[in-house]
Image (cartoon, rainbow, N blue to C red):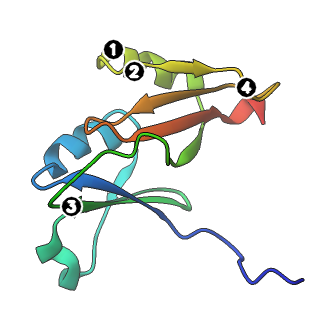
Amino acid sequence: MTSFVVGLDHVQVAIPVGGEVVADGFYVDILGFEMLERPAAMAPRGGRWYGSGPVQVHLGVEEDFRPAKKAHPALVVREFTTLCGRLTDAGVEIRESHDIPGVVRVHVSDPFGNRLELIDADSL
């Protein structure tokens, strides 16, 4: 069977109402994403769009927000050790994972409790 999927445009992560500035501190200041301009029609909904090269993470505001504890995006990152140091300095708990032989990865939570996986690009 032929696959019709040719790529992944973005992942969506939920945040609580009013969480955009706190999100900027994590996704921009620590992870190094750039803030992307959202279409004007979406501005009233709140949220943020971030990008790094072809990778995009969109944050959507939810009234009855609950963090994603299991479902998560897995981001391939460079300068893994440096990034882990920045996360530690910011008080973010790093949970190591050794389940996949040869792949260096950790799990962290954003300021709202959403799970993120960070994979060392050099281990792939």
Observer-nearest residue: 36 or 43? 43
In the image, 7: left or right of 83? Answer: right
Quadrant (top left/top right/bottom left/bottom right) for the N terminus: bottom right
Spatial CA distance of label 4 from label 1 is: 26 Å
Of callouts 3 and 4, the N-terminal one: 3
Element type at mark 2: helix
Picture quadrant where residue 115 is located: top left
Mark 2 closeness class: few <14, some 14–19, many ≥20 residues within 10 Å:
some
Q: Which residue is disc 3 drawn over?
A: 62
Residue labelled with disc 1: 89
Nearer the observer, disc 3 or disc 2? 3
Spatial CA distance of label 3 from label 4 is 32 Å
Distance (Cα) linking label 3 and label 1: 29 Å
Query: Disc 4, disc 2: CB below 8 Å?
Result: no
At label 1, the amino acid type is Asp
Task: Please state which amino acid type lies under the numbered disc 2.
Answer: Arg
Mark 4 element type: loop
The residue shown at (58%, 18%) is 96
Name the residue tied to disc 4.
99
* Number of marks in the rendered image: 4
Q: Name the mark nearer the viewer: 4 or 1.
A: 4
Which one is nearer the viewer's eye here, 118 or 32? Answer: 118
Q: Earlier in the sequence, mark 4 or mark 1?
A: 1
Label 1 element class: helix
- The residue wearing badge 2 is 86
Cβ atoms under marks 1 and 2 closer than 8 Å: yes
Question: In the rendered view, would you say 23 is above or below 52?
Answer: above
**Which residue does the image show at 42% across and 40% down from the upper left?**
69
Q: Nearer the viewer, residue 88 or 99?
A: 99
Q: Return the residue nearer the eye: 17 or 120.
A: 17
82 left or right of 5?
left
